[in-house]
Amino acid sequence: MSSNEDSGKLGVILVLIMAIVMTIVVFNGITPQDEKTESQDIYIPPYSASEYIDYIYDGDTFKTVEGDVIRLLGVNTEEKGMEHADAAKQKLEMLLNNGEIRLERDEVDKDRYGRLLRHVWSGDVFVNVELVRGGYAHVYIIEPNVKYSAELWTAQDEAVANQQVLWEPSPYDVELMEIQPVQGTDIEGLNLEKIVFRNNDQETLDISGWNVKDESVHIFRFNDMSVPAGGTVELKSGLGTDTTTEVYWQLDSSIWNNAGDVCFLRDENGLLVDSWRYTLEGDIYVFTDYVP
């Protein structure tokens, strides 16, 4: 056999090998470029949690040794000084020590404070979701960062059903009756924005130390106040003089989001008296009662 024939056969073999390789790659739907694209969204620090994390501020925020402040996406925990804040902080610390830390961004990279907005994994634990599932955080999604919304809402449904931490019910028979988002931007309009709740008990109820909170960070605490049996209380957002049935937040801007929000009513021990979530669907508000 001539050398030309050998070269020809070798060329045919090489072509066949290349064809087989390309077929396997296409069949699996993966190319080197695809692999690179898939991994670009997730940053894997080459450290364990103890080597990577410098400080934990609260249940949803921590600082890395490089100086970056990380704010967990899609969740909100209670602020320092509130009843469940320390438990949430301790839970975050525990979750972050499950293994190698991975950070994934969504559509928006940073918030207005310069914090990196991230979905966080520790080993194979999705930290954001587990905080919600355990009841240490509630869902707090701000568009367009909505990638894991379904997982977060499912986790919250479990926490509510199991009455975990933030969802532990109060023994008091009090229920929210109305949430009215703002009707205007002036003082008169702000006083049309209100929540209303009723004492269904047979006795007068002391609500001193109770609080109302939205899904963000706004919180109102009741001072010296009682509600008679069957009586109602209106908490208005604007300025005014308190009465036995009307209380004013004394704000110059609205609290309750027109597009949707959550109202938490808690007793003096931080237990959940009632909670409503509302969303605007078309021109109609749809309400979900978390304490039926």
Image: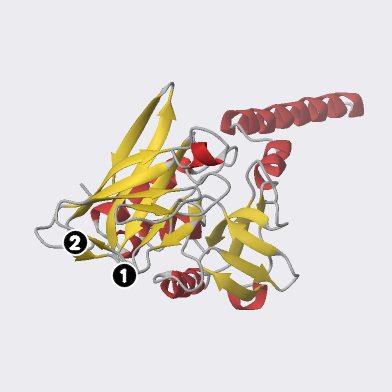
Task: State the quadrant of the N terminus.
Answer: top right
Q: Along the line of sight, which residue is nearer the eye, 100 or 60?
A: 60
Find numbered disc 2 in the image and state the secondary structure of the residue it sits on: loop
Look at the picture and state if 58 lies above or below 73.
below
Q: Along the line of sight, which residue is nearer the eye, 259 or 198?
A: 198
What residue is shown at x 84% (from left), y 29% (from top)?
A: 6
Give the percent coordinates (x, y) of residue 265. 33, 56
What residue is shown at x 37% (from left), y 57% (from top)?
A: 133
Find numbered disc 1 in the image and state the secondary structure of the residue it sits on: loop
Is the Cβ of the residue at disc 1 closer than 8 Å to that at disc 2?
A: no
Q: Amino acid at mark 1?
A: Glu
**Badge 1: how crowded within 10 Å, few (<14), some, or many (20+)?**
some
Between the residue at mark 1 and the residue at mark 2, the CA separation in whole angstroms equals 11 Å
Mark before the other along the chain sequence, 1 or 2? 2
Tag 1 residue = 268
What residue is shown at x 58% (from left), y 73% (from top)?
A: 56
What mark, if any, has residue 21 been given in the picture? none
Look at the picture and state if 271 lies above or below 31.
below
Give the percent coordinates (x, y) of residue 194. 40, 43
Residue 171 visible here: no
Count of numbered badges drawn on the protein: 2
Look at the picture and state if 8 lies above or below 84.
above
What mark, if any, has residue 172 been given in the picture? 2
